[in-house]
Amino acid sequence: MRNKISSIKLTENFKKEILYNSLCNGLGQLQCYGLEILYSDSDYTEGKKSYYERTKKLSGACYEDILMEILALDKKIVFEDTETGEFFNLKLSEALNNLDNLPVWVVSQLLDESDDSTTADVVLQFALFNEVIFG
């Protein structure tokens, strides 16, 4: 069957939710491709402080909470391809723009909450590359 949908416009909040959930469920797959996540210690410390100030929580932040906070602070998370030595920057604004180009099947799984690690992998690859490069 030919695809009858040419594009889907997602809200910014939904795209942030998608990105956050994909960080939770898909980072391990990126490591399987030889992509190592990098960020500065000072960015992580700043992100953690900002997260706790913003949420008014005293503890309980998970790793992905802090990664999203780093991105929200307009900082970048870098992925190094350990095989080629290339570096790829993940910035929130670019990632959100790229998520508008997700395949329809991915958006469908996200909407009906049948997404899994494969879905998360595709989301993260689109966030980084605006296409699927690996797998």
Image: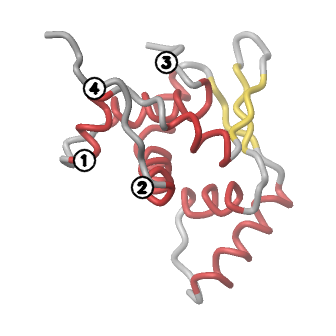
Q: Secondary structure at mark 4?
A: loop
Q: Name the residue beneath numbered marker 4.
A: 5
Neighbour tally class for label 4: few under 14, some 14-19, many 20 plus, Cα within 10 Å: few
Q: Name the residue beneath numbered marker 1.
A: 111
| The C terminus lies in quadrant | top left
Q: Nearer the viewer, mark 3 or mark 2?
A: 2
Mark sitting on residue 132 = 3
* Residue 124 screen position, x and y as percent: 51, 34
Mark sitting on residue 14 = 2
* Residue 18 screen position, x and y as percent: 42, 49
Q: Earlier in the sequence, mark 3 or mark 2?
A: 2
The amino acid type of the residue labelled 2 equals: Phe
CA distance separating discs 2 and 4: 19 Å
Q: Nearer the viewer, mark 2 or mark 4?
A: 4
Neighbour tally class for label 3: few under 14, some 14-19, many 20 plus, Cα within 10 Å: some
CA distance separating discs 3 and 2: 20 Å
Q: Nearer the viewer, mark 4 or mark 1?
A: 4
The amino acid type of the residue labelled 4 equals: Ile
Q: Is residue 130 left or right of residue 104?
A: right
